[in-house]
Image (spheres, grey):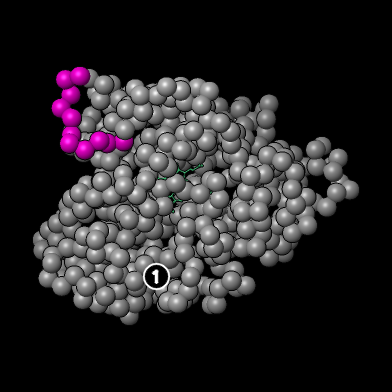
Amino acid sequence: KRISKKQNKNLPPSPPKLPFIGNLHQLGSLPHQSLWQLSKKYGPVMLLQLGNLPTVVISSAEAAKAVMKTHDLDSCSRPPLQGAQRLTYNHQDLAFSPYGEYWREIRKICVLELFSVKRVQSYWSIREEEITKLINSISHHSSSSPSSPVDLTEKLFALTASMIFRIAFGTSFEGSDLNHNRFNEVVQAAEATMGSFCAAEYFPYVGWIFDKLSGLHQRREKIFHELDSFFQGVIDDHLNPGRKKNQQDDIIDVFLKIVKEQTGFGAAILTETNIKAVLLNMFLGGVDTAAITMVWAMAELAKKPSLMKKAQDEVRNCIGNKGKVTESDIEHLHYLKMIIKETFRLHPPAPLLLPRESISHFKVNGYEIYPKTLIQVNAWAIGRDPASWKDPEEFIPERFMDSPIDIKGQHFELLPFGSGRRVCPAIYMGTTTVELGLANLLYSFDWELPSGMKEEDINMEESTGLSLTLNKRTPLKLVPKKHL
Ligand code: HEM
């Protein structure tokens, strides 16, 4: 109804829709790819009707700049997604909270206190210790069964989960109530239920019935209670005066100090619920994204051994016999940084970023965008746009050799972390993890394909589903040969 009232206005082009579901059936199992195909026909600013939700899809650097820079303030809210509502304590987190006083306050705390360069650097020893554990476990595998492959996907997810766990809670999995596997399962399940098809999102009034029948509602409740009681347990433990404190503040210590010292937090008061909601963002935002990036980078290098060798020569010439790469070495690894940018271009971990919602009326490329429209920026499509990239399907890190393009949201042809007010607040934390992890894998081992496999056999398909992040469909398995 809302759209038909505006029929005489200049709305973005739309593919034909079906009654009731609109364009939902056109999303397919890989929405970013389906939307990319549709954008080739309907243009870089396209209007879809997803059930009840008018949705504008942005698929060019120029249109992304118009939304995320020129009209950032008009478009920087988040839609009140039902999928995320329960798990974020009614959108009291940072990532899904609507634009307003609360979001500004919590974002300020996160940027200044939790994800600042100084804070992230203070956790250097956690990152280095966890990477040393990973290298030791791969070395052990390589000496006990020299020609068998390791599952790098599994190892790298375990690595990033352990790092974030220690940074957030000050203890490792071994010292906690929840074991490693169960914790990973719960985090993956939380992510899946956030991204999964939630009928209530698209069909208000009746959608909840489908969600009850499909079991989505019950699954979400179960995950919510498990995560909530775990987070509460760790917070209670930190509040216990008899607790033996680490030398260094973990994220819960930092938060609890803010709670204790706060005189006022905007109009409201920061509570334990807010802490739990932001902890959830850290796990859902921080574990998968860095692991996925390392997996894709290793898969691309395994497909192109000459690039793998070039990267190894760089890191080995730089580090010599030191035994491991440390964070201060990273600034010298220019080729590695180009590999990471190229990986982000072809495999942005969040291909559609996070959805935005428009707050006021504005125009993009001459088309009208109305308030309360959902906006999806297709970073995956923009990274493959031939208008911005030569040979876009090819993995060529050298394209960044003399290029000013970086990944921090100032160059709209490359947006792995988004841009504008909603840009990822943890870019430094994410890139540091990826750089250090990859550098050590390349320094410590030569990587071979499992016997009988050729480079062209490596499966580069993306995992299907409506998850917010985009993983490689099959695990990456390579044979490590210890270098030193
Ligand atoms: C390689 C690593 C990472 C990538 C590629 C990534 C990507 C993104 C993207 C695309 C967004 C949405 C931006 C937008 O809407 O324009 C985002 C937001 C966010 N990310 Fe990250 N992220 C990474 C690491 C992390 C880490 C390590 C954390 C926390 C520990 C984190 C926490 C968040 C939060 C809280 C938001 C929401 C910000 C807001 O809405 O104000 N991310 N990230």
Q: Residue furthest front?
A: 263
Q: Which residues are magenta?
A: 241-251
Q: Is residue 376 above or below residue 240?
A: below
Q: From the image, which quarter does the N terminus lie in?
A: top right
From the viewer's side, name the closer residue of 421 and 183: 421
Residue at image x 34%, y 73%?
335
Q: From the image, which quarter does the C terminus lie in?
A: bottom left
From the viewer's side, name the closer residue of 15 and 254: 254
Q: Is residue 176 left or right of residue 292?
A: left
Report the amino acid beneath label 1.
Met
Q: Is residue 112 left or right of residue 418?
A: left
Q: Which residue is mark 1?
A: 338
Residue at image x 74%, y 48%?
362
Q: Is residue 10 above or below residue 224?
A: below
Asked which quadrant contains residue 256, the reply is: top left
Crowdedness near tag 1: few (<14), some (14–19) or many (≥20) residues, C-alpha within 10 Å: many
Q: Position of residue 375 (x, y in %)?
A: 64, 47
Residue at image x 59%, y 56%?
378
Residue at image x 25%, y 77%?
313
**Element at label 1:** helix
Q: Residue furthest top?
A: 241
Q: Is residue 23 visible?
A: no
Q: Residue furthest bottom?
A: 306
